Every structure is written in C-alpha cells, then in structure tokens.
Image: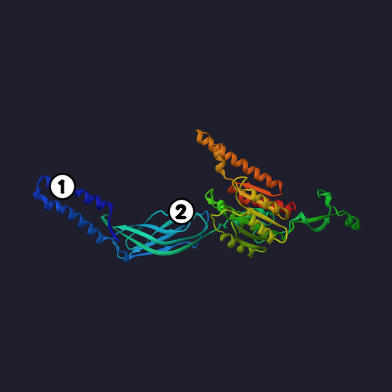
C-alpha cells in the first residue's frame, strides 16, 4: 500500500497559504497557484515510483523454538532489496498473540546490494505459546514524501516453558559430597534413621549408637552407622487458582512455585526419592504419580509446563481430599498456594488438618514485599496511613493462619520469591535428616 507521508502532507499544506496569497495579490496568477499544488503532487508520485517495490524485498525471520519464563528472547529479521542503488530504512513491527509484552518497532537498515539485519526483543509474561502471526513493514522513498506498507505473514510459534537452565547448577550446592561431575551420589553415612553398618567406636561418636550386643560378642566397642532413608514419595501440589496468577517480582506466583518445585524435584530424585505433581483449582487439573529416576524429571518438567493460569477460586476441600485418597502411603506433600485472610483460609485449614494426620506437609506461600513497603513507608497524608493500617492487618491475619498451621504440625515456609527455591530445598533436607518422613 502506497500512502503519503506526514512530510508530504505538510509540504502540500504549505502551498495553500502561498496560493491564497497569490490570488489575493492578483487573480490572474491562479495558474501559478494551481501549479504549486500539482508540482507537490508530482513530487509525491515520483517518490512513490522510486520507492522500493515489495516484490524485490526478500525477508528472513528466525525465531527461537522456545523461551524460558522470566527471560527475554530475540526475533532476528534480515532482509535484502534486489537491484537497490541506495540504502533503505525499513520499520519492522511484529504482529503477535499470546502472553507477551507489547512489541516495539525496530529499524532495519538495508544497504545497497547487501543484507541488513535487526533483532526484536520478545518478553514473555506467562507460560504458554507466543505466535508471531505477521510482520508489518513500512519504508519511504528517497524524498520521504511517499511510503509503502506491507504485511508479511509468518505464523511462527514460540513455546514459553519453565526456566530449568539453572536448576542443575543450583542443585550442586546441596550435594557437597559429590559436587564433581561424573561421580555418583554417595551414601550419606552417620545421619538418618536407616541402618547402614557397624564400625569401630572411636572418640567423638555418639554413645547412644553403641551396639552393646555386638560389642560384647566381638570384645570391642562397635557403633551403628545410619544413612538417610530413600524411596520416599514427594508430591508437588500446585494451586492454579486466580490468586496464583497474580504477578510478584515480575512473574506470576505460579511460575515462582514451579521453578522452586522443579529444583526440589531434581534434588529429591538425586537423593533417591520418588517425585510426582498435582495441580488443582476448582477441580483437579493434573496428577502425576510419584516415580524415581532421572527420566522422572523430564515427565515432571512437561507436567509443570502444562499447568495453566485459571481465573477460578480454588476448592481446597476437593483438591486436598482427592490427593489424600490417591496417596496410599506416607508422603511429603509440598503445597504451593496463596490466601488472603483468615476467612478465606478456613476451608484450607480444615483440609490441611486431615492431610497432616497422614502425611508430612510443607505449606509454601510467597511473601509480597509490597505489603512491607506500604507498612514501612513514611506517611504523607491520610491516604497512606489508611493503606499502612490495612496492609498491617493483612500481615497480622497471615501470621495467624501460619501459626495455626504450625500448631497442626505443618511445616510453613513464607519467603520472598528470590529465596524460595533454596529455602524450600533446605527445608526438605532438614525434614529428611530429622527422620520426619
């Protein structure tokens, strides 16, 4: 499509007062006044003819097959104009669909008889799929009076998946005994509750672990060695209700939970445990049976990537009762969820009470730094004071709920997003070392 540019409109508009002035001065000068407008129109037409034709513009677009939530990607666009004798500047704007930040136009400079390239940033806001449906192109003629616009269909798809790139490196710190690549996981002797072997008792060992029966038989002191039990069932339960879709620190709460859950799953699988997942809101969305081995992590990653954002209220009674019925043996249930106040958390407390009677439960919720900022902000008027009072009430109600959960025997973890993954793994290791599973 060819259209005049703003410069052409201004130039044509400038001829109007000149033509009016000529007619006021002498009406016989009307041919000159008319020729001024025709001259500008002729320049616009000439510029349109000199403008590069779309048929001579070849375009190549490269998009990454996947993006990780929380990280930006790039769309690479390169182009060349056949037979061009001058450099052409093309404005490129992607037409996209999906949960991504609004695109911004970029300038593609194509030199004569050469290929130009430009990269356009893509910032995913949620997991799912981003589709680059087309590219809108706009360029001008050499005089800048006429321009062409074209829509180039593309139909490129980019999957937005949980970020697992740093999980393996972050998990190394939790395996200090085998942090060298290629070494198998060693048995952690001397801690845990599962009997490992007998050894000579030496100074510094706990006297409570002396095996008196075998010591009398062998006429020397022998101590029992223990190791951490394995083959425990770990279930990552994700609340996918509307509260978990709320963004915090640049990402939805659900994505923070998925990243921390994947790190915990990696560590648990390396420790010899079985890991599964469970997703629910107003109804059951997903259940992955706990399984061992490294292949289980790929299934866990795929399952977590399919958890969607729901605009529905979570039914804790249904979800936790269903999970409780599916677990036939004692397990560690890690519940990632969010609540507002004590009233909305009533059914949650009742359901967790029944769950905690059979299983070990870690209750994970994110601490919103916005509440602390509102409470600690210097009041500048009545409005900020009222906001601080409300924020403080919300903090107090959250503390009441967490205290009630702790009294039930639930392990509560309220932590900022940046410390969630490490804090969760540390809590898991502490529970295992204490033999609470």
Q: Please tell me the numbered disc located at residue 240.
A: none
**Residue visible at 63% across and 47% down in the picture:** 414
Q: Is residue 70 left or right of residue 141?
A: right
The quarter of the displayed image where residue 393 is located: top right
Depth check, front residue: 349 or 249: 349
Depth check, front residue: 270 or 181: 270
**Helix, strand or loop at disc 2?**
loop
381 w.r.t. 220: above or below: above
In percent of width and height, residue 63 lies at 46, 62
Single out the residue that lies furthest toward the left. Answer: 28
Would residue 58 be seen by someone viewing this image from the given angle? Answer: yes
Residue with the mark numbered 1: 20
Gap between marks 1 and 2 measured at Cα:
49 Å
Callout 1: 10 Å neighbours few (<14), some, many (20+)? some
Depth check, front residue: 87 or 434: 434
The colour scheme is rainbow
Image quadrant occupied by the N terminus: bottom left
324 w.r.t. 406: above or below: below
In percent of width and height, residue 251 lies at 53, 51
Residue with the mark numbered 2: 101
In percent of width and height, residue 279 lies at 61, 58
Depth check, front residue: 100 or 122: 100
Would residue 184 be seen by someone viewing this image from the given angle? Answer: no
Image quadrant occupied by the C terminus: bottom right
Q: Is residue 166 left or right of residue 118?
A: right
Answer yes or no: do the residues labelled 1 and 2 have beta carbons within 8 Å? Answer: no
**Helix, strand or loop at disc 1?**
helix
In percent of width and height, residue 169 lies at 61, 55
């Amino acid at each position: 499509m060819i259209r005049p540019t703003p410069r052409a409109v201004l130039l044509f508009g400038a001829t109007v007062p000149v033509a009016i002035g000529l007619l006021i001065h002498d009406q016989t000068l009307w041919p000159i006044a008319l020729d001024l407008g025709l001259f500008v129109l002729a320049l616009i037409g000439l510029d349109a003819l000199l403008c590069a034709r779309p048929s001579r513009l070849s375009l190549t677009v490269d998009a990454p097959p996947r993006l990780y939530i929380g990280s930006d990607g790039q769309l690479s666009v390169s182009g060349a104009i056949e037979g061009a004798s001058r450099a052409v500047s093309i404005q490129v704007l992607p037409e996209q669909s999906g949960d991504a930040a609004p695109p911004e136009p970029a300038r593609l400079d194509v030199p004569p008889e050469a290929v130009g390239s430009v990269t356009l940033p893509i910032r995913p806001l949620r997991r799912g799929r981003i589709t680059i449906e087309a590219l809108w192109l706009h360029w001008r003629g050499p005089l800048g009076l006429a321009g062409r616009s074209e829509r180039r269909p593309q139909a490129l798809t980019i999957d937005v998946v949980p970020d697992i790139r740093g999980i393996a490196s972050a998990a190394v710190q939790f395996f200090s005994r085998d942090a060298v690549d290629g070494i198998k996981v060693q048995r952690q002797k001397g801690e845990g509750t599962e009997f490992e072997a007998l050894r000579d008792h030496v100074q510094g060992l706990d006297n409570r672990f002396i095996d008196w029966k075998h010591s009398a038989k062998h006429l020397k002191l022998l101590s029992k060695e223990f190791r951490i039990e394995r083959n425990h069932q770990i279930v990552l339960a994700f609340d996918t209700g509307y509260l978990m879709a709320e963004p915090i620190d640049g990402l939805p709460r659900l994505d923070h939970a998925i990243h921390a859950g994947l790190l915990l799953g990696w560590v648990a699988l390396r420790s010899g445990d079985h890991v599964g997942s469970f997703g629910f809101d107003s109804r059951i969305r997903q259940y992955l049976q706990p399984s061992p081995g490294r292949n289980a992590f790929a299934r866990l990653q795929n399952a977590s990537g399919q958890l969607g954002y729901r605009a529905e209220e979570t039914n804790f009674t249904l979800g936790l009762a269903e999970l409780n019925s599916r677990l036939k043996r004692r397990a560690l249930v890690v519940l990632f969820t969010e609540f507002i106040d004590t009233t909305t958390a009533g059914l949650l407390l009742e359901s967790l009470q029944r769950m905690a009677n059979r299983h070990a439960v870690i209750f994970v919720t994110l601490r919103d730094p916005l509440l602390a900022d509102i409470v600690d902000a210097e009041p500048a008027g009545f409005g900020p004071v009222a906001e601080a009072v409300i924020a403080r009430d919300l903090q107090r109600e959250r503390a009441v709920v967490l205290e009630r959960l702790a009294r039930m025997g639930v392990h509560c973890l309220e932590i900022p997003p940046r410390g969630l993954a490490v804090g969760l793994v540390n809590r898991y290791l502490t529970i295992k070392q204490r033999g609470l599973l």
